Amino acid sequence: MRMLSVVCAAATLLASAAAVAADKPELRIGSVVAMTGPASALGLPEKNALELLQEQLAKDEDLPFTVKFITYDDASDPTKAVNNVRKLITEDRAHVVICCSTTPTSMAILETVTQAKVPNISLALGQSVIEPAKERHWIFKTPSTDQLQVTGLVDDMVKRGIKKVAFLGLEDSFGEGGWIALQSVAKEKGVEIVASERFSRTDTNFTPQALKVRQSNPGAVYIHAIPPSSALVHQALKRVGYAGPIYHSGGSANNAFISIGKQDVEGALLGTTPVLVYTDMPDSNPLKPVISKFAALYEKRFNVPKVDIFPGQSWDAGNIVLKAAAEVVKSGGKLDDLDAARAALRDKIEATKEFVGVGGIFNYSPTDHLGLDHRSTFISVVKNGEFRLYESK
């Protein structure tokens, strides 16, 4: 009889919990990332972080809404990205879309989310994804930009007395963004670009490009790509005898870069966000405790020795959406009114101020859909097989 009472009490509690959940509106966060294909080194960690966020939210009984995550794989393909985003918007009725892992896929979906009037947070590096902000009314992003990172790297070249730089980059919109940024920053800083070579994401032989770059006799080389390409290009430069400093975009700031490049990428310099170097930051930096907490959760959950920048980007995107949704509900907005909720969420995201995330401190505005500044931009150096904070000489 006592056992029956316990069972009945448990059933009552479960029914009560279900009733409470049913009374809450549902927030649907859709995402499309590159779980397979050439950009999977970026997309898989991004998917993992969203999964981790969902698990953490399950423990939070104080949320004024329930959260449903719907995630699809675009296989690093812009066409698949567009199709999946359309599905999220029309079939899954997502309030917000987090997409995509790369610049080409993020650029491909711009028209889709804009026409549907759905807020989108991109996980791509390319500045063109969010600029001009007037035309990208519904688009935001969490990673740093080409311009911010390239500026920091070229400043270091200038400090070293380097006058000439060569460019090696992907032959797509991501590579083009890096090329445009380098031209602009190099001109401003008085550094001459003596060579520019391109390659595709599926190339495996980079010797011809490496030879041409070496023959241009640059003081430094800047590579704007993602693994595996960026690591293989770096190795090709070493093989043809180039011995100068090699700089990389934030696209290389993940563990795949080191696992592929191994000893050859020792000394590589990368523009990056704070998550890659937080252990070397002073305790007084407000980013450090936030990153430390996330890193501990992520490393334990996915059994990795050290988190890199890509899961942090989707983690920030998810948390920015949650913060905006909480503010919409608090101000009386109804998540059940989908069109109105999408518009309200967009406005609340744009109003984000001093949000301390994993990738930096975000301050969005009508003219700035990146929201990051110099406080969120660092240079990392590969040292003894690890990413460490680099301090200019």
Image (cartoon, helix red, strand yellow):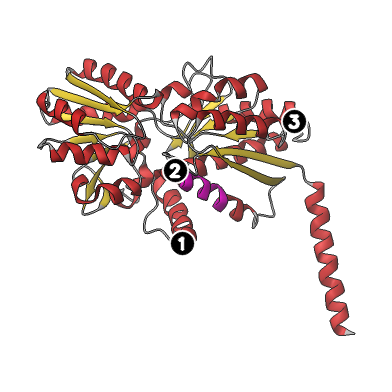
Q: Is residue 164 above or below residue 274?
A: above
User: Can you give x and y, in whole percent of width and height, for residue 28 in the image?
Assistant: 68, 40
Q: From this viewpoint, is residue 34 visible?
A: yes
Q: From this viewpoint, is residue 379 visible?
A: no
Q: Amino acid at mark 1?
A: Lys
Would residue 373 be found to the left or right of residue 3 on screen?
A: left
Would residue 165 be found to the left or right of residue 42 on screen?
A: left
Mark 2 or mark 1, earlier in chain: 2
- Where residue 263 is drawn, which disc sits there? none
Question: Disc 1, disc 3: CB below 8 Å?
Answer: no
The dominant secondary structure in magenta is helix
Taking the spot 19% from the left edge, 51% from the top edge, the residue there is 263
Q: Depth check: 387 or 86 in front?
A: 86
Q: Is residue 18 above or below residue 63?
A: below
User: Can you give x and y, in whole percent of width and height, for residue 51 in the image?
Assistant: 57, 51
Nearest to viewer (mark 3 / mark 2)? 2
Image quarter of residue 187? top left
Image quarter of residue 58? bottom right
Task: Please name the residue that numbered disc 3 is placed on.
Answer: 338
Q: Amino acid at mark 3?
A: Leu
User: Can you give x and y, in whole percent of width and height, for residue 110 in the image?
Assistant: 55, 22
Disc 3 to disc 2, C-alpha distance: 32 Å
Task: Please name the residue that numbered disc 2 is placed on.
Answer: 40
Task: Please name the residue that numbered disc 1 is placed on.
Answer: 300
Mark 3 or mark 2, earlier in chain: 2
